């Protein structure tokens, strides 16, 4: 069982206030320590109190006696020379600190990380919205992390939340651990952003390059960053040609890409002409690059007459009729 003797130390307004040593304590003290005790420079404790044995490298018979309240989990406190001197006198230690000697006490902890906090809030908002939409949580003042003692569950939850779907603002109460008596309770405020997964380049794509599936990766973005002409489906990109250099991670729009040409300028092609119930074909030459379904200028190589048609496939242009009617 832990022994906490009446060291006559009280914690008042965050300060340790010392009273004269009790005579009974002096009578019980034993001068059994070597004259050269070694004070530790930095001490880590995993308890609510700092014990006499925590302060020195040597083993002490009264080592389990509590001499100070430990800091909160993840925090530190400093014991100065005056405090250390009074401890030494109280326990009749043949040791005294140097004039400015001090020791820093740290408390072991386990970390509630920023992603854990955001996830807890996202779950609470999703429950309030009645939706499983992917959300991004932005806390006022930036990310928040919490330190818990090591003897409780490392978890966090939201005990209460107010959410305004019009402004996407929220006010919530965080508690940690998630179950049982809370060790930490914190009011937090912030904004919720709905997210979407969209395809973006994973490398620089040069102008004129045809985009392949391997050139893309999926990236989460705020819906507020997307516009009506944003490309959100890989099928809208694969096989298209970059009209300008496309940076890695860039949100792509319809104006950034074009259909990849299946006919190149000066290619010899087949011109399909429909007259009445007859369909004729003659040789022609493309006067410009064109993609499938695009309009292209061509020339009939027999008559040298310039015409305009629609690209049917890599080697065929329909002249003067609905492409669908060719079949």
Image (cartoon, helix red, strand yellow):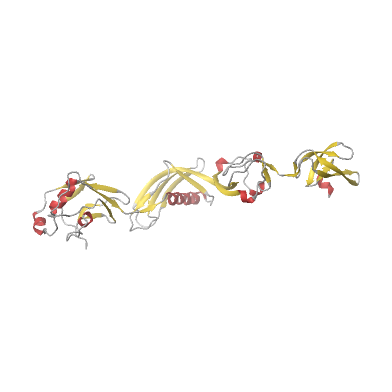
Q: Quadrant of residue 205?
A: top right
Task: Tell me if 92 is positioned left or right of 237 in this view.
Answer: left
In this view of the protein, can residue 321 be seen by the observer?
A: no
Residue at 58% across / 49% down in the picture? 217
The image shows residue 59 at horizontal and vertical percentages of: 20, 60
Q: Quadrant of residue 267?
A: top right
The single residue placed furthest to the bottom in the displayed view is 1
Q: Viewer-proximal residue, 133 or 79?
A: 79
Q: Viewer-proximal residue, 175 or 89?
A: 89
176 vs 310: above or below: below
Q: Quadrant of residue 298?
A: top right
Task: Tell me if 97 is positioned left or right of 325 in this view.
Answer: left
The image shows residue 160 at horizontal and vertical percentages of: 42, 49
Task: Tell me if 225 is positioned left or right of 259 in this view.
Answer: left
The image shows residue 221 at horizontal and vertical percentages of: 55, 45
Task: Tell me if 166 is positioned left or right of 324 in this view.
Answer: left
Count of numbered circles in the view: 0
């Amino acid at each position: 069982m832990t022994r906490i003797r009446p060291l006559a130390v009280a914690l008042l307004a965050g300060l340790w206030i010392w009273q004269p040593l009790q005579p009974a304590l002096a009578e019980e003290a034993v001068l059994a320590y070597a004259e050269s005790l070694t004070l530790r420079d930095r001490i880590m404790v995993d308890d609510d109190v700092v014990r006499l044995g925590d302060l020195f490298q040597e083993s002490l018979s009264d080592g389990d006696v509590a001499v100070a309240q430990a800091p909160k989990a993840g925090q530190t406190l400093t014991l100065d020379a005056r405090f250390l001197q009074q401890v030494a006198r109280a326990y009749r230690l043949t040791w005294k600190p140097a004039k400015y000697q001090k020791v820093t006490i740290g408390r072991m902890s386990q970390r509630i990380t920023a992603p854990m906090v955001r996830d807890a809030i996202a779950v609470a908002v999703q429950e309030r919205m009645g939706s499983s939409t992917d959300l991004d949580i932005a806390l006022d003042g930036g990310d928040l992390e919490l330190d818990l003692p090591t003897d409780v569950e490392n978890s966090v939850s939201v005990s209460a939340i107010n959410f305004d779907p019009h402004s996407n603002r929220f006010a919530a109460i965080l508690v940690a651990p998630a179950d049982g008596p809370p060790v930490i309770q914190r009011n937090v405020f912030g904004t919720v952003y709905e997210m979407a997964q969209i395809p973006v380049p994973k490398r620089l794509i040069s102008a004129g390059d045809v985009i392949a599936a391997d050139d893309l990766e999926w990236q989460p973005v705020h819906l507020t960053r997307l516009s009506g002409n944003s490309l959100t489906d890989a099928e809208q990109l694969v096989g298209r040609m970059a009209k300008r250099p496309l940076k890695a991670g860039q949100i792509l729009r319809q104006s950034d890409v074009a259909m990849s040409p299946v006919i190149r300028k000066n290619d010899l092609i087949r011109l399909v002409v429909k007259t009445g119930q007859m369909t004729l074909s003659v040789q022609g030459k493309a006067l410009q690059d064109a993609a499938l379904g695009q309009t292209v200028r061509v020339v009939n190589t027999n008559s040298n007459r310039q015409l305009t048609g629609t690209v049917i496939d890599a080697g065929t242009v329909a002249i003067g009729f609905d492409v669908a009617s060719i079949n």
